Amino acid sequence: MKRVLVPYFNIGLGHFAFARSVKKAFESLPEPWEVRLMDMGEELPGKMLTNMYVESWRTILGAPKPVKSFLFGLNRLAPWATDLGLARGNRRNASAAAAFLTQMKPDAIVACHWGTAHVLNAGRRKAGIDVPLYYVYGELAGIVPQIRSGADNYFYMTAEAERALIDIGVRQEQLVQIGLVLQPGLELPLPERGAARRELGLAENRFTVLYALGGEGIGNAFPYLDAYYSEARSSQMLVLTGKNREFQKSIQERYPQRADRGSVVAAGYVQDIKTAYGASDILAGKCGASFAMEAIRYRRPLLVTALGAPNEAHNRDYLVEHGFGYYVPRPEQFVEETERLSRDEAAYQAAIAPEPTPIPHDGATDIAVWVAQRASETIRQA
């Protein structure tokens, strides 16, 4: 049985969701594969990788907007400075990565975070192991230079992502286009709206906004929620607070249910995310890749209120340009657009009108099939 290693860092939702989807796709192939998910921050010794790729990202998400913009601007102007720090950490972990690869002996690596691709590329070189390394580029558009990680091939989902990868030096022959990669189960139809709302404790016949700030639940949400609570009258809001229990508690205390106020309901971890999407009419919040792709998949217009980090501007621009969402950076704009869509049925139907050419949403299957075919070709040539 062939083995595939699927490494990720446990930050936010997208990387782990991608890894689980890839695992499920490999396990669905006609020829069996052994799939090994790897939380690299937890499984390699020491805290350096966790500090570099996980804690630093959480710090950026929680930083003021000017600080985020400065850091990303600095990386664009002088990417070598970031590269030096990352290269040092990757080299220091190369021996541990090499030992892991030597013990596991995978037939392929499908990296679901660019940092894991860097570390395992250093590890395979140190060990002298000729194992194919593939990277899943999970954004709809835009790029940071560090995405170029030494992977043999890069999976991408849109023409905008293809251009961005070429701009940082990835060769055309290294690129493989796939459909959208969604969380496991989101390739399936959604539950009926009324039933989903009843399950979540929402009013069954009320226009519903699903608000989220990603898996970490970090961001400046309260100006938008305050405005909604004060002004909205034609809808109800379900807020997914992710891992942030303090955020959930604050919402419950700050927005008591009152007849003369907008309804704001907080939900932490939702066992079946399809239920939350099934309950919703529109989405709102920050514009992480997973949330953006799920808006596309289910035709739920995404009202982008803020960016978790400046790189999300590319996802926002993609959604707005292709008719999948709106940018409403001011709280009063957010409430105004929410009320417009909830009151004006014609406007809402126009917002959810399908694209002329549907975007495929079976990207994980595309990855598994492509990697399996490459592995079979290698065996025949040997």
Image: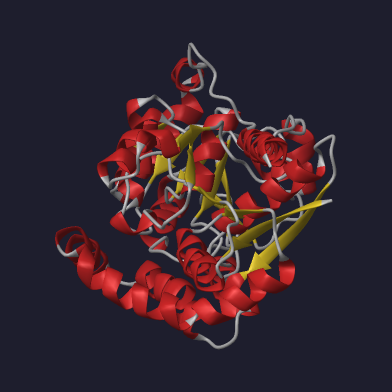
Q: Give the left or right position of residue 18, taking residue 173 as reference.
A: right
Q: Quadrant of the C terminus?
A: top right
Could you say where residue 305 lies in the image, as x and y percent from the top left?
A: 37, 48
Query: Is 23 rendered above or below residue 30?
Result: below
Q: Is residue 153 above or below residue 51?
A: above
Lateral position of residue 26 relative to residue 214, left or right: right
148 vs 53: above or below: above
- Asked whether residue 328 appears in the rendered view, the answer is no
Q: Seen in the image, is 65 located left or right of residue 226? A: left
Residue pictured at 65% horizontal, 57% vertical: 6
Query: Residue lying farthest left?
Result: 77
Nearest the camera: 353 or 13? Answer: 13
Q: Residue at x 84, y 38 (%)?
A: 31
The residue that appears at 41% across and 47% down in the rendered structure is 231
Residue 52 image-quadrant placement: bottom left
Foreground of the two, 91 or 312: 91
Q: Tell which residue pokes out farthest to the top in this image.
A: 356
Residue 147 is left or right of residue 300, and the answer is left
Residue at the far front in the pictured view: 382
Quadrant in which residue 111 is drawn: bottom right
Nearest the camera: 148 or 76? 148
Q: Do we see residue 307 in this rendering?
A: yes
Rendering coords of residue 8 (x, y %): 58, 62
Q: Residue at 85% of width from left, 44% of height from top?
A: 32
Residue 58, position as x, y percentages in the image: 44, 72
